[in-house]
Amino acid sequence: MDQPRISKGLSLSKARSVGKQIKSSLPWVAVEAVVNVIYGAAMVGVIGWLIPPSEFGAASAALAAIYLVETFSKAGIQDALIRERSIHTEVTDVGHTTSVGLSIIGMIVSIAIAFPLSRVMDDNRIASFILVSSFILPLNALVAAPLGIFMRKMRAAQVMRRQVTSKIVSLIVIVVGGLYGFGAWAIIVSSVTVPAVAVVNIWLLMPRFPKFRWNYRISKRLIFFGFAVSGELACWSLMSRAFALLFGYFHGLHELGALQFAFRLVDEVANLVRLVVSRLGLSAFAALHRVGGDIAVSFEKGTRLINVASAPTFAGLALLAPFMVPILFGHRWNEAIPYIQIFSISWMVAMPRILVSPALRAIGKQYLQLSYAAVSAFVALAATVTIGQISPFLAGVAFASRQLVSVPWGVLTMRRLLGLSTSRQVLALLPALTATALMALVIEAALYIIPNGHLAVKMISTVFIGAITYVVSIVLIDRKSVKMARSILKRN
């Protein structure tokens, strides 16, 4: 691993400084993650109440095209700036120029596909929707470099306040547009509002605005790193969309609706952790790499804490889905229950590996992650084609089978690149998994003992009993994680 040469004493001092930055940033990032989940739930509710399904479908088709183009046009420049060894003004200016230039190319591509897609979808409005929503690309590009600087410095409080403001304004726009009957246009304008408000908010924070400046060598270096990031994201995006198309083809649109509902529900829960990782993961590991800190220790600690939070959450979601779904969403969504359970278990397995990607990017091995993403997507889709046709349930299992690649690959990669032995990685997860198993046994017993008189009361009681069991178990068997959590709370 290519480590900078820094004296041991200076390295330890700077590594401690990075640790303090991480601890002070965590609460702000956690707040942003919670707000994002609330925002997502509110948007779903508003769309359900105020936007007709046909209008939602038309807007979704246009935005899907835009975001697919953006996956490639943004080229991971923001991540490249975070990872840069030195980020003087020339680097930020070139990064800004490159990001905006690529976004304009993406905007041209979006405009070029607008009318053909409109004809394919047999809705002339889609072309207009794409033309307007294509402004999302340059607007996001304008804040890519500034956000990269803030995230590199782990200034989470400033980023959180500005991002939350843009979400609130966006929600107001879609509510007003929906109430006045603008339908799909309310969604399109609301989507453009998010980056537009973010541009104003983020740029107001900047002590110096990035200038348009070009340097071929710097731009090439940023793009070389960034395209691996974009390629990885493209693999995940194409995998999920291809799976949805295959599933719908094999089992019909009604069953696809149940699966997509489950996917959206579990994904919103997973976003609580994913946003924290996206905001701090690369920034923290890259900072440690620059000062010669021990990435392996931070990876182990971060994985341990993530598993402590995620294992009981997804296990509880899988166990309580049969009660939660009819209570919260009605019996018409009961068909989604098996998929919720499959995706919850899948995420419980995947979460301990979520720091692998930012760790690889920080040490300049991002193309390994791209290779893994491509192989994982191939395994998931191949399994779907071969056994997914048999039944909807097996199709869901086939999609989750990609974790059979992620777990051993992640463990072996971290052992080879960071020197983390397999036993050390496994032992870091065992306390939380043991506590989760105890919680699951208690929940099953409670579901058997508590009468079925009122399902809501039964579910709330079971959640409370399960939570108490897990907290007590963790305190008793995982003192190391408790100590780390207390350290973070004391710092803030």
Image (spheres, rainbow, N blue to C red):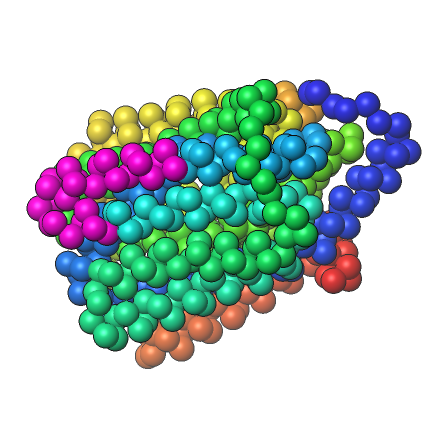
The stretch of residues the image draws in magenta is 104-129
Residue 108, magenta (yes or no): yes
Instruction: Count how many numbered circles sit on residues in the image.
Output: 0
Q: Position of residue 225 (x, y in %)?
A: 54, 26
Name the quadrant containing residue 17: top right
Residue nearer the viewer, 309 or 177: 177
* Residue at horizontal 68 percent and vertical 52 percent from the top: 207
Residue depicted at 34% across the width and 26% down the height: 379
Q: Please say whether residue 276 is visible from this viewpoint.
A: yes
Q: Residue at x 70, y 35 (%)?
A: 88
Q: Quadrant of residue 94?
A: top right
Above or below, 143 relative to 368: below
Residue at horizontal 57%, vertical 33%?
213
Magenta-colored stretch includes residue 362: no
| Quadrant of the rendering where the C terminus is positioned | bottom right
* Placement of 368 over or under 198, stated as above or below: above
